[in-house]
Amino acid sequence: DEFHAYPSKNVAAFFQSLDKDRINAVQGYFIDRLHKDGKLVPIQEGIPMQEQFPVGCQLHNSFQKGTPKKAMAFRGFHRINRGHHRFAPCTFWAERHYLHLFPGARCPTHFPAIRVAQKTLKVHHFKWIEGQLESAKLKIQGYSEQDEVRQQYVGMIQHLEKYNGVCVKCRENACVKEYTGESDSVQDLKKKPYYEAIKVPPKGAGKSKAQVRSSSRGM
């Protein structure tokens, strides 16, 4: 349910342009795609997804559902975490005993520094459809009452039940009318606000100083 949007709709040409600048990683940012009214509707055959779900929101922030970042592309000598959200040197994952999840299960003998493309691109997330509420209610059964993840799901479920879907006019959801493909970077969304213009949170936003220090080694 995650669709990457690359500039000019030409992935090969885009990667070739990165090679010229020795860029070896591309960072994405989740755009949660919704029905125009925020309702959790079924997908219809024969109609483009972007037309069925024309609104883009930032629900990771308002629902506190982890990071909205996504590792879109990277050279084979780099490693990312299990959720494909974060770049970091191979040694970073080795220290955290993650290497068994990667091909070869070892670090290369030599690898260049991580050089991420300047523009953060969109990853369109078509998750908010019919059945999402029921799915969330099933998932919380696997967590204890005190678990932080369960509390996040409870908050999301309460929101979905209160608004019969997602509130596209609520400021905290930062919803906009999405482009249909002419613009590819997250920053460009500010040009045509629908409900609220999207803003990519600054690095470390919402974290304590201790949390920022502990995560500063990865990207």
Image: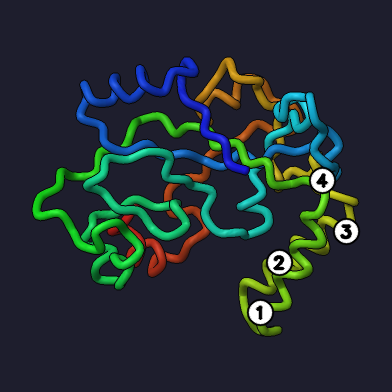
The reply to whether dot 2 and dot 3 touch (C-beta < 8 Å) is no
Task: Say which amino acid is labelled 4.
Answer: Cys
Left or right side of 114 for 211: right
Label 2, on which residue? 153
Q: Quadrant of residue 152?
A: bottom right
Residue 29's label in the rendered image is none
Q: Amino acid at mark 2?
A: Tyr
- Mark 3 is surrounded, within 10 Å at the Cα level, by few (under 14), some (14 to 19) or many (20 or more) other residues, namely few
Residue 123 percent coordinates (x, y): 54, 37
75 vs 7, left or right, is left
- Residue type, numbered disc 3: Glu
Q: Which residue is mark 3?
A: 161
Q: Residue at x 39, y 58 (%)?
A: 81
CB of mark 4 within 8 Å of CB of mark 3? no
Is 177 displayed left or right of 123 in the figure? right
Q: Upstream in the sequence, badge 1 or badge 2?
A: 1
Tell me the element at label 3.
helix
Which amino acid, by three-letter code, is at mark 1?
Tyr
Residue placed at 64% from the left, 44% from the top? 58
Q: Vertical placement of 16 versus 118: above or below?
A: above
Residue 143's label in the rendered image is: 1
Q: If the image is split into quadrants, where does the N terminus sit?
A: top right
Q: Nearer the viewer, mark 1 or mark 3?
A: 1
Labelled disc at residue 167: 4
